Image: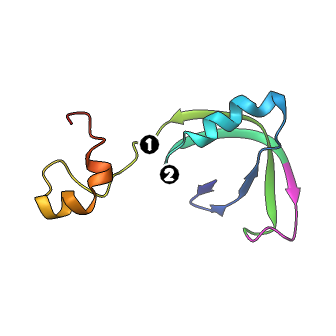
Amino acid sequence: LRDESGAVQLVNPRTEETEAVAETISGLAQGSFITVTGELKHDERVKLGGIEVKLATLEVETAAIPETPIAADSGLDKRMDWRFLDLRRPEM
């Protein structure tokens, strides 16, 4: 989790109640805007300022659109370099 003041590590303990949260997290793209609640813990092992948040709830306010390294109007050479992504375009 990152904002203008820095970054903090989020921890999602694996339980049956948090499976939905785990699925939501796995579908997030970098740059998505989320709201979380949880328990703030100090842990010196954490490299991000020694602070982590044990997740209780997570809400996706705005999902970011994942960027691809190729544009729709890219040249053939670039499309061939990234063909494994290019073939997944909706118009293919």
65 to 40, vertically: above or below: above
Q: Position of residue 54 (x, y in %)?
A: 82, 46
Quadrant of the frame with the C terminus: top left
* Residue kind at label 2, given as amino acid type: Gln
Q: Position of residue 74 (x, y in %)?
A: 15, 56
Residue 22: name its quadrant.
top right
24 to 50, vertically: above or below: above
Horizontal side of residue 77 vs 67, given as left or right: left
Q: Earlier in the sequence, mark 2 or mark 1?
A: 2
| Residue on which the image places disc 1 | 64
| Residue on which the image places disc 2 | 30
* Residue 13 located within the stretch drawn in magenta: no
Q: Residue at x 54, y 42 (%)?
A: 28
State the count of labels: 2
Q: CA distance from mark 2 to mark 1?
A: 7 Å
89 to 45, vertically: above or below: above
- What stretch of residues is rendered in magenta? 40-47
For the residues bearing labels 2 and 1, Cβ distance under 8 angstroms: yes
Kind of element beneath mark 2: loop
Magenta highlight: main SS: loop
Q: Position of residue 60 (x, y in %)?
A: 57, 34
Horizontal side of residue 58 vs 80, given as left or right: right
Q: Residue at x 70, y 40 (%)?
A: 36
Q: Position of residue 43 (x, y in %)?
A: 88, 64
Q: Residue at x 12, y 51 (%)?
A: 73
Residue 23: name its quadrant.
top right
